[in-house]
Image (cartoon, grey):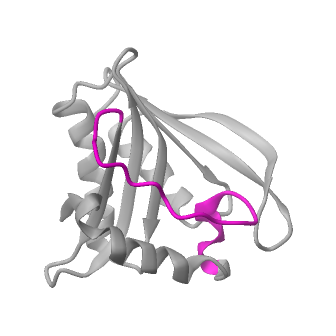
Amino acid sequence: MLKPAQLYKEKLEKLFLRTWYDLKYMFYSGWTGSELPTIPDNNYDAHHFASVDNNGNVIGYISYRISWITMSADNFGIISFGNHIEFARDVYKVICDLFEKHGMNRVSWSAFVENPAVKGYRNFIKKHGGRECAYHRQVAKLLDGKLHDDVEFEILACEFKK
């Protein structure tokens, strides 16, 4: 279930610190170094959520930026601290809420091509609308010392199927 990340700042900080030198998480940060996410004290132009299981354990983090002028959401940060189906449901809920509650016109995100989540993102847009709109080659050097490609996804409100 989604909770405001502001309520879990300390827990999230510890979880993020544990990911810094773990190759399993290299696709999250987007470069060879990492930094803790800045979780603001407001939610005007960015939303930050902790995904929490039924026992109150933080299982993931989701953030994004909002432009109220263009009615779009982008600059997503999505990280799972384990393989939890509840987290995938929370990501789906965030995207649904962006269209249904907040009236967004466009939602876009990108991921490194080798990221295991890309398969899920491709299945998601196949089922719920949207498309792969860009492929960028060798955009970032990650913890493994190699340059990696990324792919960008987008969904317009007129394409979104719940």
**Residue 13: percent from the left, percent from the top?**
43, 73
Q: Which quadrant, please, contains the N terminus?
A: bottom left
**Residue 149: percent from the left, percent from the top?**
76, 51
What's the residue at 41%, 44% (across, down)? 64
Query: Residue 28 or 9: which is nearer the viewer?
Result: 9
Q: Which quadrant, please, contains the C terminus?
A: top left
In the image as oriented, which residue stretches furthest toward the front? 41
Q: How many marks?
A: 0
Magenta-colored stretch includes residue 42 = yes
In the displayed structure, would residue 50 be above or below residue 107? below
What's the residue at 29%, 64% (across, down)? 50
In the displayed structure, would residue 104 be above or below residue 136? above
Q: Is residue 152 visible?
A: yes
Q: Is residue 87 left or right of residue 30?
A: left
Q: Quadrant of residue 7?
A: bottom left
Q: Is residue 118 left or right of residue 140?
A: left
Q: Is residue 162 visible?
A: no
Q: Which residues are magenta?
A: 24-45
Q: Quadrant of residue 70?
A: top left
In the displayed structure, would residue 49 be above or below residue 95? below
Magenta-colored stretch includes residue 116 = no
In the displayed structure, would residue 82 be above or below residue 146? below
**Residue 116: percent from the left, percent from the top?**
57, 67
What's the residue at 45%, 58% (across, down)? 78
User: Magenta stretch: dominant SS?
Assistant: loop
Q: Is residue 16 left or right of residue 6?
A: right
**Residue 47: percent from the left, percent from the top?**
32, 45
What's the residue at 47%, 46% (across, down)? 76
In the image as oriented, which residue stretches furthest toward the top? 69
Q: Is residue 19 left or right of residue 95?
A: right
